Image: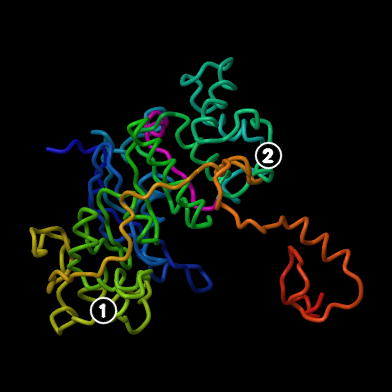
Amino acid sequence: MADVILKADNLYKHYPIKGGVLRTTVGHVKAVDGVSFELQRGETLGIVGESGCGKSTLGRVLMRLEEPTSGTVNFDGVDMYSQGGSAMRKLRRDIQIVFQDPYTSLNPRKTVGDIIGEPFEIHPDVVPKGGRKKAVQELLEMVGLNPEHINRYPHQFSGGQRQRIGIARGIALRPKVLICDEPVSALDVSVQAQVINLMEKLQDELGLSYIFIAHDLSVVRHISDRVGVMYLGRMVELGTEEEIYQRPTHPYTQALLSAVPVPDPTMRGKREQIVLTGDVPSPANPPSGCRFHTRCFKAQDRCKVDDPELVNRPDGAGEHRSACLFAEPRVIVETVDVSDVEVDTRFATTDVVDIDAFGDDEGVLPADATTVQQRSQVVGESEGPLDRPTDTTRLVDDEPAEHRDPRV
């Protein structure tokens, strides 16, 4: 039997809707509505779904940053919600979080050293006071940043570097579980890959278990061992990476996968496009029966009445958990196999490209290539009016729409 480190059982989180002069409760937003799953020690569980499905709320409830309306979370054999005071503080050492936005999750008035070292102030028994600076520098180096930058402020770092700082803060106490709430969604694609590679490296070194919340199916596929798909506060499908991406049985999962871009032009015509009609229902007033039936291309009258459970259903090569009364596997044309992708991270921690890092190999740049500085100098020394807009090279930091003259 697998070693389960975290188990969520029938979790609910409903937010009251206030109305009227007396601000009485007139309804509830059902952000998380009966979610159950297990996280095994050392694995990565991806949670995907469109915006507003309850992914981030689920992460905060698991951290106990939000108190659940009902349900339980068992962490490493302990009922988390029955703990209080010092017992809960001790438990928090073992479950940490990395937030989505690297620009707002770091205090701009504090240095990087203070930000990463703050967990040591809350848990002084982890690192002796005299050794905290060294511990912070080791954490910076562990996430690929220069330890000498300990006294810099967040605004002096790029977005990818700031997220590395957030990760360093998250692993400072050597937790057992790290909840990653869309940790790469605010980053460029190349930087996303660098951060994902870093997280995989840290997982191997520290034995971490991840709950990886995201809406990017390609990123989730790359990092996850198992994947859970959420829709309108519910978990509608749960299985291994292979089961979800190659043999999805829930119509919503099938629709999501059919929307993933196919880079190979020869394969695009072979992909069946599943177009969902209608809008996502309000979580304050979800439909009866199956919550997806208002948009489902397979919906029948029974779906409007019966609420399907998340149970094992056949997928063509076995079975995995799906909440659909008419679940059946559908083969999705592969997009890109990213399972073995490795990204060059030579420039992961610098804002200036080191040309020497390319080596002396010929063919890296064209023989007649010139630098931007050289090209702009030539333009600056030209005499007379320019005949065509293409004769001008210009670098701008503002919006192109602000420039009305195409020659300037």
| Quarter the C terminus occupies | bottom right
Image point (33%, 84%), residue name: 277
Residue in the picture at 35% in, 64% down: 49
The vertical placement of 118 against 128, above or below, is below
Q: In the rendered structure, does residue 99 fall within the stretch colored magenta? A: yes
**Which of the marked residues, 1 or 2, is nearer the chain's N terminus?**
2
Which of labels 1 and 2 is toward the front?
1
* Image quadrant in which you'd find residue 336: bottom left
Q: Quadrant of residue 380?
A: bottom right
Q: Nearer the viewer, residue 311 or 25?
A: 311
Q: Residues within 10 Å of mark 1 (few under 14, many from 20)?
A: some
Is 97 inside the magenta-drawn segment? Answer: yes
The residue that label 2 is drawn on is 153
User: Percent from the top left, x then y, of residue 273?
Assistant: 29, 79
Q: Is residue 393 left or right of residue 31?
A: right
Provide the secondary structure element on which disc 2 rests.
loop
Which amino acid type is marked by label 2? Tyr
x and y, in percent, of residue 374 in the image: 78, 56
Q: Residue furthest right?
A: 384
Q: Amino acid at mark 1?
A: Glu
Q: State the SS at label 1.
A: loop
Q: Is residue 238 above or below residue 139?
A: below
The residue that label 1 is drawn on is 272
In the image, residue 281 sits, relative to residue 223, either above or below, namely below
Task: Give the residue drawn at x 56%, y 17%.
Answer: 131
Task: Judge from the rendering whether residue 195 lies leftward or rightward of residue 321; answer left or right.
Answer: right
Q: CA distance from mark 1 to mark 2?
A: 49 Å
Range of residues picked out in magenta: 89-101
Residue pictured at 54% horizontal, 45% vertical: 361
Residue 390 on image: x %, y %: 73, 76
Q: Toward the viewer: 336 or 73?
A: 336
Q: Mark 1 near mark 2, Cβ–Cβ under 8 Å?
A: no
